[in-house]
Amino acid sequence: MKDSPVNAERKTPREARSKPKFRGVSTRRLFEEVCDQIRVEVAAGNLRPGDKLPPERELAEHFEVSRVVIREALRSLEVSGIVALRKGVKGGAFIQDGYPDQLSQSIRDLFHLGRLSLGSLTEARVLVMQMVVPLACKRATEEDLATLERNVEETATLAEDPLQSGRLAHNLQFYQLVAACTHNNTLRVIVDLVTEVVLHELMHIDPDPLADLARSRRRFFRLFRARDVERATKQMVTHLKKLHRHLSA
């Protein structure tokens, strides 16, 4: 049974956009003002993912600043994940699609600097998935279920993959697919943020303690496919807590 439009994430078409309007800047940190104006145009919908910004020289004329300032602004926007800088004949500065790589890196940095503990991250992860699984159970489509099932069935071989990076990517995808079943992009981003750092730490664990990973995920999927919200959620929490015990051992 499909959810009513009230429960689904609303996707309202953007209104017709105007041509970006840049003005000259005069503050001390000129590149920050340039960044702010470009962000304003993105927020207004005048610049969208995939759009190419004008060449450096043209931007310098619009903003009435030097090309050095423009380069500094573009580098700052690249670090923030707003633009991607590409080289070559078809290169330039392009508005990004907003994937939260930089947010994930910030979380990892805070963890490595000691501002976030592994215990707090794993606790947050359990709490987030306790919210995600019930909603995902209710909203998952047949296509969602088929995609998740493929991932679960591949786990048996990948759990013992000596190439740790391959196992990490597959594990991350499992949680991403569960979150995708919610059809709520905000929850998908949150799951990514609280999961990626923890899974990076799992790379340092010998695969042997994770030998029953496939069985655990198959149990979860059977309950999930049956829309058994309570038991599927309980199975996910049990699964996560077991992994976290290996991390803290």
Image (cartoon, helix red, strand yellow):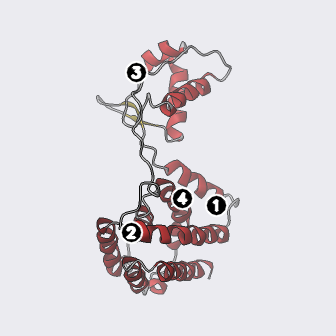
Q: Which of pointers 3 and 4 indicates the residue nearer the eye?
A: 4
**Local crowd size for mark 4, using a 10 Å CA cut-off: few (<14), some (14–19), many (≥20):** some
Circle 2 Cα neighbour tier, 10 Å, few/some/many (<14 / 14–19 / ≥20): some
Residue 115 vertical placement versus 162 (above, below)? above
Alpha carbon of mark 1 to alpha carbon of mark 3: how far? 38 Å
Q: Which residue does the numbered mark 3 point to in the structure image?
A: 55
**Type of the residue with mark 3:** Pro
Q: Which residue is mark 2?
A: 170
Q: Quadrant of the N terminus?
A: bottom left
Residue 165 visible (yes or no)? no
> Separation of disc 3 and disc 4 at Cα?
35 Å
Judge by depth and name the residue closer to the eye, 20 or 224.
224
Residue at 60 percent of width and 24 percent of height = 33
At label 2, which amino acid type do we have? His
| SS at circle 2 | helix
Q: Position of residue 230 (x, y in %)?
A: 51, 80
